[in-house]
Amino acid sequence: MKREAEIVRETRETQIKLKLNIDGTGTSQINTGVGFLDHMLELFAKHGFFDLEVNATGDLHVDDHHTVEDVGICLGEAIKEAVGDKVGMRRFGSFVVPMYEALARVDLDVCGRPYFHYNTPLSYGKVGTFDIELAEEFFHGFVNHSGTTLHINVPYGTNRHHIIEAIFKAVAKALDISTSIDPRVSGVLSTKGTL
């Protein structure tokens, strides 16, 4: 069974088409109009071994907020659709990524219950033209639409680019682990028998 999804989202603020193959090789074609987000999605695909295509146009004359948030929403919807009934999946994933002086730890559960914890030294500022608080908005959209419990903790780091890049890489690695099929799992990994 192919674990793939194609999401189309059209609003007055954004038009997005996203294709995802969870069991890919890490190839990507990304064009959101937000350069830093493109970079983060490319490395997300590469380190998670996801095949990912994203084409987005948005109201960038206003700012990057709607585009970044809506791409997060679409990625979340794609993950939810691609994992389907979650049969055979490991479900939980954790990973720690060091990026020079920054360290990001991600723990997640693809369980159908959205919850988001975001603890980083980031507050306000920019990476190039990218408002750093948009990283949090991206993952809010992702969590709410994927039904994932996601804990992001960055105990230290000073370079904004390094911190956000470490987060995206750690999420990709943890998601790859959690969505991987384990032959020992019969049905879904829950004593309730459903997720």
Image (cartoon, rainbow, N blue to C red):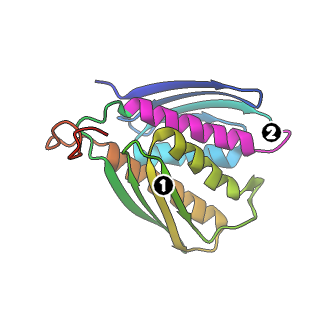
Q: Which mark is residue 185?
A: none
Q: Which residue is mark 1?
A: 169
x then y, percent, for residue 40: 58, 49
How many residues crowd around disc 1 within 10 Å: few (fewer than 14), some, or many (20 or more)?
many
Say which amino acid is labelled 2: Leu
Please tell me whether the stretch drawn in magenta is mainly helix, strand or loop.
helix
Taking the spot 36% from the left edge, 59% from the top edge, the residue there is 94
Q: Quadrant of the N terminus?
A: top left
**Along the line of sight, the residue nearer the viewer: 88 or 22:** 88
Residue at 64% x, 46% y is 37
Residue drawn at x 27%, y 38% as measured from the top left:
194
| Residue 122 shows in this picture | yes
- Taking 155 as reference, is 50 left or right? left
Q: Is residue 88 above or below residue 167?
A: above
- Front tag of 2 and 1: 2
Q: Residue at x 53, y 37 (%)?
A: 75
Nearer to us in this view, 121 or 193: 193
Q: Is residue 51 left or right of residue 23?
A: right
Tell me the SS state at disc 1: helix
Amino acid beneath label 1: Lys
Residue at the far front in the pictured view: 192
Residue 99 is at least partly visible in this image:
no
What x and y, as percent, mark residue 168? 52, 54
Say what secondary structure mark 2 lies in. Answer: loop
Instruction: Point out the image quarter for the C terminus.
Output: top left
| Sequence order check, earlier mark of 2 and 1 | 2
Query: Which region shows up in magenta?
Result: 61-82
In the rendered structure, the answer to whether residue 63 lies left or right of residue 46 reads right
Q: Indicate which disc residue 60 carries.
A: 2
Instruction: Tell whether 66 sits left or right of 89.
Output: right
Question: Can you give x and y, in whole percent of width and height, for residue 158 in the image?
Answer: 63, 74
Is residue 160 covered in magenta?
A: no
